Image (tube, grey):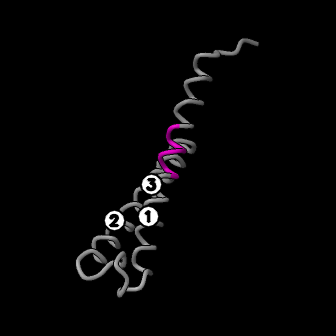
Amino acid sequence: MKIDWAALASVFGVSLVVTVALVGVFTLGIVALSKLSAPASSATGATGGSAALARTGAYAAFAACVAAVAYGIYLIVA
């Protein structure tokens, strides 16, 4: 039995990078949603247009996570 160490390292590297990127995008979505739950009277709270931008950014981040997971499942099944 021969193991192709270069291919194994390549799969490990790509998996690591994609996992870190996916966790980062999901974290950005959580942070954007936490901006919405901050009190509007505080200096850092999202108000008006920034609340809509934060919500849109959070939904986009979560949609990117769902797309990445769906693509991964597609690669496994196909």
Q: How many marks?
A: 3
Sequence order check: which comes first, mark 2 or mark 3? 3
Give SS at disc 3: helix
Q: Is residue 50 above or below residue 12?
A: below
- Looking at the picture, how far across and down is residue 20, in whole percent? 52, 44
Q: Kindly state the secondary structure of the residue where label 2 is placed.
A: helix
Between marks 1 and 3, how big is the CA–CA gap?
6 Å
Q: Mark 2 to mark 3: distance in Å?
A: 10 Å
Q: Residue 69: x, y in percent? A: 51, 52
Tell me which amino acid carries mark 3. Val
Residue at 52%, 52% (x, y): give it. 23
Q: Which mark is residue 57?
A: 2
Q: Main secondary structure of the magenta part?
A: helix
Q: Which amino acid, by three-letter code, is at mark 2? A: Gly
**34 w.r.t. 22: above or below:** below
- Return the x and y of residue 29 as percentages of the image width and height: 43, 64
Where is residue 33? Give x, y as percent. 43, 72
Residue depicted at x 40% and y 74%: 35
Q: Residue at x 40, y 78 (%)?
A: 36
Q: Which residue is mark 3?
A: 25
Q: Measure the C-alpha gap from mark 2 to mark 1.
A: 7 Å
Pick whichever, 45 or 4, lies toward us.
45
* Badge 1 amino acid: Gly
Q: Which residues are magenta?
A: 17-23
